[in-house]
Image: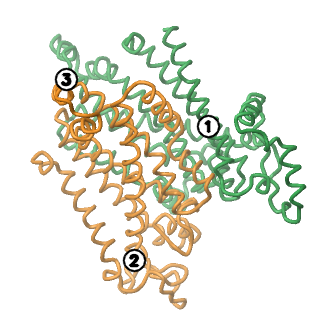
Amino acid sequence: MRRFRRHPGAWVGSFIVLTLVLVAAFAPLLADRPPTQQDLRARLRPPSAEQPFGTDEFGRSVLSRVLHGARLSLATGLLPVAAALVLGSTIGLLAGFFRGRLDAVLMRAMDVLLAFPSLLLALAVVGTLGPGIVNAVIAIAIVDVPQYARLVRSVVLGAREEEYVQAARALGARDGRLMWRHVAPNAVGPIVVQATLGIGFAILAIAGLSFLGLGVQPPVSDWGEMLARGRRYLPDATWLMIFPGLAVSLTVLGFNLLGDALRDALDPKA
Amino acid sequence: MLRYALGRLLGTVPVLFGVTLLVFLMAWVTPGDPVVAMLGEASQGISRQALEDLRRELGLDRPLPVQYVGYVAGLLRGDLGDSIRSRRPVLAEIRDRLPATIELALAALTIAVALGVALGVLAAVRQRTWVDGAAIAVALVGVSIPVFWSGFLLMMVFALELGWLPASGRGTWQHLVLPAFTVGVSSAAFIARITRGAVLEALAQDYVRTAKAKGLAPRRVVLRHALRNALLPIVTVVGLQLGGLLGGAVLTETVFAWPGVGRLLVDAIVARDLPLVQGSVLVVSLLFILVNLAVDLSYAAINPRVRYG
């Protein structure tokens, strides 16, 4: 913990992530008006004192839309990571603990998923299920599963040979208890690091899918979708692209900083 | 070496099996009737009996394993099916677009390796100085910025403001510069981070101390001794980055209207042109698998420990 507090990235990362959470929670209070409120007399206005981020092609407040976008980005970043974490960790735990044929089958399946470039696999899933935010979240979850499976498996393989695990086994502990009480806790640290970095990746990937028109579908909007729409008004209305892009970048940077700091703090070798 | 190469080659077989199976199954997971999807608008007003006949004609009534074998046999003949939208063979569509993507990926890879390794070595050698801090910060920002935004920023500055380079399309080498930089810089950031770590680790080894002790010039110690031994993780990450590069290329191709496979795939997804989606995913994945195979074999050549490990 002390190591974490001394890490310069930890402070900046925590600050960004905390800010994001607060913005997501209090977006309606922070924004001067609802993100969907149109004002057709004030279309495509550049940033001003009244509208610090300018307005879009329907005269909607870009500031309000960016603030509200934090909600969807955070949710769509957390969901696939949570799903992948649960599924992947279970696979890794079972594979590493029971070894043998189960291990071989599960890990070969993971190898197949890893054989695809990650964004391509996400596109394949969305291409199969159809565009949409739910399918995009499923896609990113599937992409992430092998990472957790491999990570947990490697920790478990090491841990199951430890003396305290052998001792517990000798004392008559059953497989289930051994697995969850004695072996699994070893994986918590690495999983936290992986998940923190994973949220950044997920937010980036979902924004990418939305940018391609395969994630959130209008009228719902996230930062990626704002970028895709803003592109049509280049080179004149640059503010339509600058602010949502800045929001994505800062968010991902925050999670990356936090993840790096956690890794340095938890990994004694670093 | 031959033994290792053969083993690695054999290890690819189950992966190829899995990848083709997954791509084959896409047609069955996808919502809706594949025959209706294939016919598109023409399916309206066709009798149920006619649909059944067509299904039998296409062999879609046979058990899945039989169909899969047929699918793989088709692949081996280079038959990826026909695009629903253009009615052209999928392979021909991909062949038209693949050179553009490979061109972009190779240019981006060159930029990524040159920038990434230089930045990483610099940071490692000047560890815990402002140079190191700046290099880490640049790499971290590079990893965090989405390519579809950095591409736009580069386009704004160099194409629209300064007018030095074309904003989009493919043709001269100038067209390649911005997309290649966009994809390359994000990969460079990853490579820089790994390079820094690997070089730092190598610099802490005994043989580096020996090399320093016998009075070798610092430049020589870093380049000949440390970097050389740090190559293994670097080559690995470069191989893996190629996947990221291909992924980044999908997004970048959209930003710069670069006529590659990525753009083709995204258009195919939007049009629900499943054969074309399957074909593009398959071809790019196979490419990725082949490259990684080559990477593995090359570092077996670099490092004897891999061969005998």
Chain letter of disc 2?
Answer: A
The reply to whether residue B121 is in sight is no
The residue that mark 1 highlights is B102
The residue that mark 3 highlights is B204
Q: Judging from the image, what is the letter of the chain drawn in green? A: B
Residue type, numbered disc 1: Ile
Query: For the residue carrying disc 2, how many other residues have a C-alpha within 10 Å: few (<14), some (14-19), or many (20+)?
Result: many
B22 or A90: nearer the eye? A90
Q: Is residue A184 above or below residue B146?
A: above
Is label 3 in a helix, a strand or a loop?
loop
The residue that mark 2 highlights is A63
Residue type, numbered disc 3: Ala
Looking at the image, which residue is at 53% across and 24% down?
B293
Q: Return the x and y of residue B122 as percentages of the image width and height.
A: 28, 34
Q: Colour of chain A?
A: orange
- Residues flagged by tags 2 and 1 on a common chain: no
Is label 1 in a helix, a strand or a loop?
helix
Q: Return the x and y of residue B177 as percentages of the image width and height.
A: 55, 46
Residue type, numbered disc 2: Leu
